Image: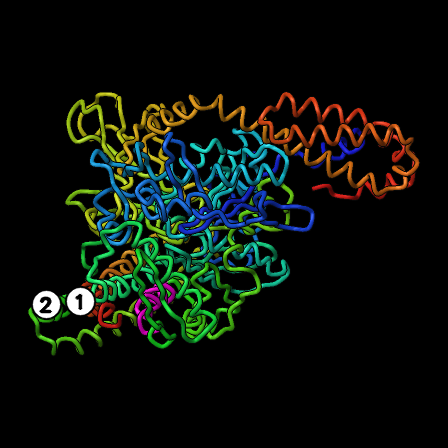
C-alpha cells in the first residue's frame, strides 16, 4: 500500500512557490482524485479504505487551500514558521485608522435610523473594495519576490514578513467590508424582502 | 439444467444495487451490460410507493399494498416519513399541521410514530421500504442483495444522512455510499465523458428541493455548489390544493374532513390527480365521491400557477444562492437537467428555463433518473464503471460552539468531501478530565440558530494544570457527507476516547438493539427468503427448459425423454406455490436431472454458442 504526504505542496508534487498555475493545479487535482478517491477502494480492505479516506481529505483540503491565493499564503507562512494568527487582527493597522474612525460613525448613524448615512456607507464600501484590490496587487508582487529568492535566504524571510503584514491588513479590510455589508443589508431585512416577493 | 447453471454462475456475482429512497416513491436499479436498469417487481411495477402500514399482527408492509391500506386503514399507515428522518419533535411542528403523523408521547431525541400496536422510528419505517426494494431486486437479479448505494437530498444534514444509513442497516443492508440525488441524476445522464461544461441539476421531488451546479471534465463530475430545502416539494403543492378543497367541502357539506382520516386521504388523492392532470391539460376537475356525497371543483392552469408561484419562487431563491456560491452567472450554465416528479409542472419548466436561459434536459423519466444514477455510482464502486468519478460537496458549514454561544466554522459549505479540519482544545480547570465539544451545522453565527449535530465528550484526559492539556480533535466529513470525529492527546500522542451523543436520531446502541430485535424474526424471514430463492431458481430453469424445447436438440430427443421432462416440469409448477422450499428444491433437482440429456445434446451442437450469449431472465 502506497503512502501519501500530508504536506499539501508535496501531495500535489509542486515546489513551494506562492504563485501557482491554476489550470495545472486543477489537472493535478483531478489526476490525484482518480488515484485516491474512496470510490476506488470500496472493494479493497478496511485498511485501504481508511487510508483512501484520509488521503482524499488531505487532497481536498490541500486543493481548497492552494487554489486560493490568500489561503495559500497563510498556509505557506504557517509551514515556514510564521503563523498568521499571532498578530491580532483586532489591532487597527495605522494607515487605516482614519477610515475606520469615520466608518464607525457612519455605522452608528445608520443603526440609529439615520438613512442619510447609507450613501456615505456605499461610497465607503467602494473605497474598501479598492483598498482590497490594492492589497491584492501588493500581494502578487510580494509572491514574485518570494518565489524568485532562495527559500532559506534573508530576502525570502523578509518577503514572508511583509506578506504577513499585508495579509493582516487584508483580513482587517475583509472584516470592515463584512460589517458594511451587514449594515447595508441586515439579514432580517433580507428575510422580509423574501417574504414580500413571495 | 446443467449447462445453463454454469452461465448463471457468472451472472450471479453479487451486485451493488442503487436505491432512490424518495419522499413519495422509491425505486431500485442495477447495472447490466447495457447500462443502468430499473428493478421491476413480479408484477412489472417499477415504483414502490414510500408508504408503510402496520398489519394486525404487527408486521410491516410497504409499497403498493400499504398504499391501499392508506385509504382503508389510515391510522396504521404512514407516508412521507422522509420528512421526519433525522429530526426532533420540536422541529416538525409545521409538518404536523399538514401531515397526519401520529407522534408518540415518549419520543425522546428521536421521533417515534404510533402505528397500530407498534411504536416505530422513521429509520425503522424507511427500512420497511428498503426491504421491499431489496426483495424486488433479489427477485429481478435472482441473487441475494446485501450491498447498496442510497441517494439522499443534497441538502440533507448529517443527522438526516445518518438516519438514512441507519435505515439501511435495519433493513440488513450494507450501505456502501450515500449519494446526493442531483449528483446521481447527472451521472445517469452520463453526458458524454469527453464533454466539458457546467451543468445545473434542478431536483424538485415529493418533499425536497435541491439545486446542484457541476463542472464536467473528462468523466469527472465535480460539484461546485449545492443549495436546497429539505422541506419543500410536491407535497407542499398538494397541501395548497388540499387546503382549498377542504375549505370548499366544509362550506358545501358542512363537514370538516380534516378530522376524518379516510376522507382527507381520499381528498388528497383527488387533488394529486388534478395536479398531475394539469401538467397535460389546461383545465381539470377536483372530484370526490365520499359517503354518498359528491364534491366537484374546476381548476385551470392559470389559477394553479398563481397558487404555486410562491413555492416555485422559493426554489429560484435557492438557485440564485447556488449560482453565487459557485461564482457563476446564469449565462455560464451550459446545460440544465430536470429531476423529480414536480418538474413535470409546466410553470416549473418555464421558470427554470427563464432563470438559466437554457432549454432543460428532460429525456430521462424524472421519476427514474435518480435511481439510474445510483446504479451508475454502484457500478463505480464495484469497479465496473472506471472512467467516471463523482466529487461531491458538503451542503452545510460545520462548526463548533465557542464562548458566548458563537459558532466557529471549521469546514465551510460547498467544500469537496472528504474534507477535514483539526482543532486543538485545552482544559480550563486544574485536573479537568473531560472536554465537551458541541458540533453544529448551518450558516448562522449563533449556535442557537444552527442545527445541533452532536456533543462529543473527550474523556479520560490526563489530569494536568489548566491550559496545559492539548487535545487535537480531527473533524472529518467522509464521502457520504457524514461527520467522523477522532481525538488524540498532542503531548502523548495517545488516542483519546470520544463519546458521541447525537442531538437527533438514534444512538449506536439503539440501532444495535433494533437490529437484534429484528434478528428475533430472522427465522421466519429466513424461511420466506429460502422459498423465494427457490422460486427464482425454478423460474430460471423453467424458462431455460422452455427455450430449449424450441431448439433443434428437443426434436432430436427420444419421446420418453421428452415425456419425462414434461412430467418434471408439471411437478415443479405444482410445487411452485407450496411455500415449501425443500419440496421446491427437490423438484428443481428432478427437472435438472431430466434435462441432462437435452443439455448434453445442445452442448454438442452449434446451438451452444448461441445459447451462451442468451441472457435468461
**Residues at marks 1 and 2 touching, judged by CB atoms closer than 8 Å:** yes
Residue B188 placement: quadrant = bottom right
Q: Can residue A138 be seen in this view?
A: no
Question: Residue at (59%, 48%) from the top-left corner?
Answer: B44
Secondary element type, mark 2: helix
Question: Residue at (31%, 65%) from the top-left corner?
Answer: B295
Q: What is the magenta range? A: B305-321
Q: How crowded is mark 1: few (under 14 residues within 10 Å), some or many (20 or more)?
A: some
Residue underneath mark 2: A111
- Residue B211 versus residue B348 in the image, above or below: above
- Residue B239 versus residue B552 in the image, above or below: below
**Residue B445 or A21: which is nearer the viewer?**
B445
Disc number for residue B459: none
Question: Residue at (11%, 76%) from the top-left corner?
Answer: A115
Quadrant (top left, top right, bottom left, bottom right) of the N terminus of chain B: top right
In the drawing, does residue B178 fall left or right of residue A40? left
Q: Distance between the residues labelled 1 and 2?
A: 8 Å
Residue B412 included in the magenta stretch of the image: no
Amino acid at each position: 500500500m502506497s503512502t501519501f504526504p500530508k504536506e499539501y505542496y508535496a501531495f500535489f508534487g509542486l515546489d513551494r512557490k506562492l504563485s501557482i498555475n491554476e489550470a495545472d493545479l486543477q489537472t493535478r487535482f483531478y489526476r490525484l482524485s482518480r488515484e485516491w478517491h474512496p470510490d476506488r477502494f470500496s472493494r479493497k480492505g478496511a485498511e485501504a479504505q481508511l487510508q483512501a479516506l484520509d488521503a482524499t481529505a488531505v487532497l481536498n483540503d490541500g486543493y481548497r487551500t492552494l487554489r486560493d491565493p490568500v489561503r495559500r499564503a497563510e498556509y505557506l507562512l504557517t509551514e515556514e514558521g510564521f503563523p498568521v494568527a499571532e498578530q491580532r487582527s483586532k489591532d487597527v493597522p495605522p494607515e487605516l485608522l482614519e477610515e475606520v474612525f469615520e466608518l464607525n460613525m457612519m455605522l452608528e448613524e445608520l443603526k440609529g435610523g439615520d438613512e442619510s448615512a447609507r450613501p456615505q456607507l456605499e461610497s465607503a464600501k467602494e473605497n474598501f473594495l479598492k483598498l482590497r484590490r490594492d492589497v491584492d496587487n501588493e500581494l502578487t508582487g510580494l509572491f514574485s519576490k518570494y518565489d524568485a529568492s532562495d527559500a532559506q535566504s534573508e530576502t525570502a524571510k523578509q518577503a514572508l514578513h511583509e506578506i504577513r503584514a499585508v495579509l493582516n491588513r487584508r483580513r482587517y479590510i475583509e472584516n470592515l467590508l463584512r460589517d458594511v455589508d451587514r449594515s447595508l443589508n441586515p439579514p432580517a431585512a433580507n428575510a422580509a424582502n423574501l417574504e414580500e416577493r413571495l | 439444467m446443467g449447462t445453463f447453471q454454469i452461465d448463471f454462475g457468472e451472472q450471479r456475482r453479487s451486485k451493488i444495487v442503487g436505491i432512490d429512497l424518495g419522499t413519495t416513491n422509491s425505486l431500485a436499479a442495477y447495472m447490466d451490460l447495457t447500462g443502468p436498469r430499473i428493478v421491476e417487481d413480479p408484477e412489472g411495477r417499477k415504483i414502490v410507493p414510500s408508504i408503510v402500514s402496520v398489519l394486525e399482527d404487527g408486521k410491516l408492509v410497504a409499497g403498493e399494498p400499504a398504499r391501499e391500506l392508506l385509504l382503508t386503514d389510515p391510522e396504521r399507515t404512514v407516508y412521507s416519513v422522509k420528512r421526519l428522518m433525522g429530526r426532533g419533535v420540536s422541529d416538525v411542528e409545521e409538518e404536523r399541521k399538514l401531515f397526519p403523523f401520529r407522534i408518540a408521547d415518549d419520543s425522546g431525541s428521536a421521533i417515534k410514530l404510533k402505528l397500530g400496536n407498534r411504536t416505530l422510528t422513521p429509520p425503522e419505517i424507511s427500512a420497511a421500504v428498503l426491504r421491499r426494494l431489496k426483495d424486488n431486486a433479489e427477485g429481478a437479479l435472482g441473487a441475494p442483495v446485501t450491498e447498496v448505494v442510497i441517494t439522499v437530498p443534497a441538502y440533507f444534514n448529517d443527522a438526516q444522512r445518518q438516519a438514512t444509513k441507519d435505515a439501511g442497516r435495519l433493513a440488513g443492508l450494507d450501505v456502501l455510499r450515500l449519494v446526493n440525488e442531483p449528483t446521481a441524476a447527472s451521472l445517469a445522464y452520463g453526458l458524454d465523458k469527453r464533454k466539458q461544461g457546467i451543468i445545473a441539476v434542478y431536483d424538485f421531488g415529493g418533499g425536497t428541493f435541491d439545486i446542484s451546479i457541476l463542472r464536467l471534465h473528462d468523466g469527472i463530475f465535480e460539484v461546485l455548489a449545492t443549495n436546497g430545502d429539505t422541506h419543500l416539494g410536491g407535497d407542499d403543492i398538494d397541501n395548497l390544493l388540499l387546503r382549498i378543497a377542504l375549505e370548499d367541502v366544509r362550506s358545501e357539506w358542512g363537514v370538516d374532513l380534516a378530522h376524518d382520516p379516510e376522507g382527507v386521504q381520499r381528498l388528497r388523492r383527488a387533488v394529486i390527480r388534478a395536479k398531475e392532470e394539469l401538467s397535460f391539460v389546461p383545465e381539470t376537475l377536483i372530484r370526490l365521491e365520499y359517503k354518498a356525497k359528491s364534491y366537484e371543483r374546476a381548476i385551470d392552469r392559470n389559477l394553479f400557477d398563481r397558487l404555486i408561484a410562491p413555492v416555485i419562487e422559493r426554489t429560484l431563491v435557492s438557485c440564485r444562492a447556488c449560482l453565487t456560491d459557485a461564482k457563476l452567472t446564469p449565462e455560464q450554465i451550459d446545460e440544465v437537467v430536470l429531476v423529480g416528479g414536480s418538474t413535470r409542472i409546466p410553470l416549473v419548466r418555464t421558470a427554470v428555463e427563464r432563470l438559466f436561459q437554457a432549454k432543460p434536459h428532460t429525456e430521462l423519466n424524472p421519476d427514474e433518473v435518480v435511481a439510474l444514477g445510483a446504479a451508475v455510482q454502484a457500478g463505480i464502486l464495484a469497479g465496473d464503471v472506471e472512467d467516471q468519478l463523482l466529487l461531491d460537496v458538503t451542503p452545510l458549514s460545520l462548526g463548533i460552539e465557542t464562548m458566548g454561544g458563537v459558532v466557529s466554522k471549521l469546514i465551510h459549505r460547498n467544500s469537496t468531501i472528504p474534507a477535514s479540519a483539526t482543532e486543538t482544545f485545552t482544559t480550563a480547570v486544574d485536573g479537568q478530565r473531560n472536554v465537551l465539544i458541541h458540533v453544529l451545522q448551518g450558516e448562522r453565527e449563533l449556535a442557537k440558530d444552527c442545527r445541533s449535530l452532536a456533543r462529543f465528550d473527550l474523556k479520560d484526559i490526563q489530569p494536568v494544570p489548566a491550559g496545559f492539556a492539548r487535545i487535537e480533535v480531527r473533524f472529518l466529513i467522509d464521502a457520504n457527507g457524514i461527520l467522523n470525529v477522532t481525538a488524540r492527546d498532542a503531548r502523548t500522542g495517545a488516542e483519546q476516547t470520544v463519546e458521541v451523543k447525537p442531538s437527533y436520531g438514534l444512538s449506536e446502541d439503539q440501532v444495535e438493539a433494533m437490529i437484534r430485535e429484528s434478528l428475533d424474526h430472522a427465522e421466519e424471514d429466513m424461511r420466506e427468503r429460502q422459498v423465494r430463492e427457490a422460486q427464482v431458481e425454478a423460474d430460471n430453469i423453467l424458462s431455460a427448459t422452455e427455450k430449449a424445447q424450441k431448439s433443434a436438440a428437443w426434436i432430436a430427443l427420444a419421446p420418453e425423454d421428452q415425456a419425462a421432462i414434461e412430467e418434471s416440469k408439471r411437478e415443479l409448477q405444482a410445487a411452485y406455490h407450496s411455500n415449501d422450499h425443500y419440496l421446491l428444491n427437490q423438484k428443481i433437482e428432478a427437472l435438472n436431472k431430466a434435462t441432462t440429456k437435452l443439455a448434453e445434446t445442445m452442448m454438442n451442437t452449434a446451438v451452444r454458442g448461441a445459447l451462451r450469449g442468451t441472457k435468461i431472465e
